[in-house]
Image (spheres, rainbow, N blue to C red):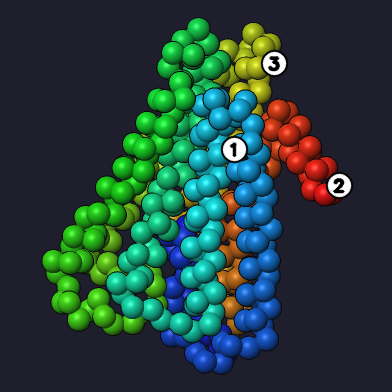
Amino acid sequence: MSSSSSASTNFTVTEGNLTGSGVYLGMLSVTAIIGNVVVFSLSIVTCFINASMVHIFNKQQIFRVNPRYILFIHLVLNEILQMTVSVSLYLFGNSFFTIYVSLCVLILLPAILTTMNTPLNLACMAAECYISVCIPLRHGNICTVKKTYIVIGIMWIISLLTILPDIFILLITEELEFLKTRVFCERDRVFRSSYSKNKKDASHLFFLVVVCLTLFYTYFRILFVAKAASSHAKKARNTILLHGFQMLMCMTLYMQNLLKQLLIYLFPGQAFYTQQAIFVLIQIIPRCLSPVVYGLRDKTFRMYYKKYFIFLKCS
């Protein structure tokens, strides 16, 4: 979902992609190569863990019929796709590749969609948790497998509606030759209209407000129920807190420009290392949270996860 000078680059990671201006050939150095290796290694490890969870989900019927696990695994799949796109563009950026605008649009589309999906998915998971604790008698009727997949479909449609206007504006306002030019793949470099930029900021703000309100409402309602000393309610309360923490991690994506300026101010002359740290903080760490926060924390999933790795070890 996501962000310099003297023998390095001046690049920014936004919306799950890496972009740049003022790229110097001197960037292709030992430092850049080491940075690429570190980021690539972290992404491979994270994707492997997430992919193993998807495999366990597909193998066990108990997970495929539970709306909570369906939403969780959708979040995992969403983050696998987001990390794959963002790391690919990161490596392109560090290797001085520009790509055709038409191809960049195709790459940006899943990057933007997955970025917008994450907060929506967190809100849906919080709502399911709220229903299971506060209105348990209706949980079976409200949270069915069919309705869960419908909600996931609606989630993708909403995210798609945030980017379709930008594509239409691009096709209307830009010359055909622009689609054939090569640029660093960045949303603001491709969708250059002021309307597109303002709409992006507005949609980010709207998504964050809606999701934050959902998390606050569900947390305090569950907190009230938890006073009855129900262990299930207390666990649900802690889960909502974890949703909020991951939401804060998502918000760093929208505040990356301020974060970049702050770190460059605090560490002048270390712009490249600053950008490396920002990318890991914004793109890698949040992707690592889901398997730990939602998968390994769950007793049932953790049991099957241990069995899976024992099987791999014995194979």
Q: Is residue 7 above or below residue 36?
A: below
Q: Is residue 308 above or below residue 255?
A: above
Circle 3 — which element? helix
Mark 3 is on which residue type?
Ser
Residue at the spot x=45%, y=21% of the render?
Answer: 144
At 75% from the left edge and 41% from the top edge, which residue is drawn? 308
Q: As drawn, which residue projects farthest toward the left?
A: 172
Q: Amino acid at mark 2?
A: Cys
* Chain-order first, disc 2 or disc 3: 3
Q: Residue furthest bottom?
A: 26
Say which mark, if any, is on residue 263: none
Of marks 3 and 1, which one's residue comes earlier in the chain?
Answer: 1
Residue 118 visible (yes or no): yes
In the drawing, does residue 112 fall left or right of residue 297?
Answer: left
Work out how far the residue at label 2 is from the one at label 3, CA to CA, in angstroms. 36 Å
Mark 2 or mark 1, which is nearer the start of the sequence? Answer: 1
**Residues marked 3 and 1 touching at CB (< 8 Å):** no
In percent of the image, x 33 and y 82: which residue is there? 182
Which is in the foreground here, disc 2 or disc 3?
2
Check residue 58 in the rendering and tell me which mark sits there, or answer none.
Answer: 1
Q: Which residue is mark 3?
A: 231
Using residue 244 as the reference point, say whether residue 109 is left or right of it. left
Calculate the distance from the C-alpha at mark 3 to the C-alpha at mark 1.
29 Å
Residue pointed to by mark 2: 314
Q: Residues within 10 Å of mark 1 (few under 14, many from 20)?
A: few
Please indicate, yes or no, whether residue 260 appears anywhere in the rendered image: no
How crowded pointer 3 is (Cα within 10 Å; few <14, some 14-19, many 20+) is rated as few
Relative to residue 140, is residue 272 depicted above or below? below
At horizontal 50% and vertical 7% (from top left) the residue drawn is 137
- Where residue 95 appears, as percent x and y from the top left, is 53, 82
Mark 2 is surrounded, within 10 Å at the Cα level, by few (under 14), some (14 to 19) or many (20 or more) other residues, namely few
Compare residues 246 and 63 and report the one nearer the observer: 63
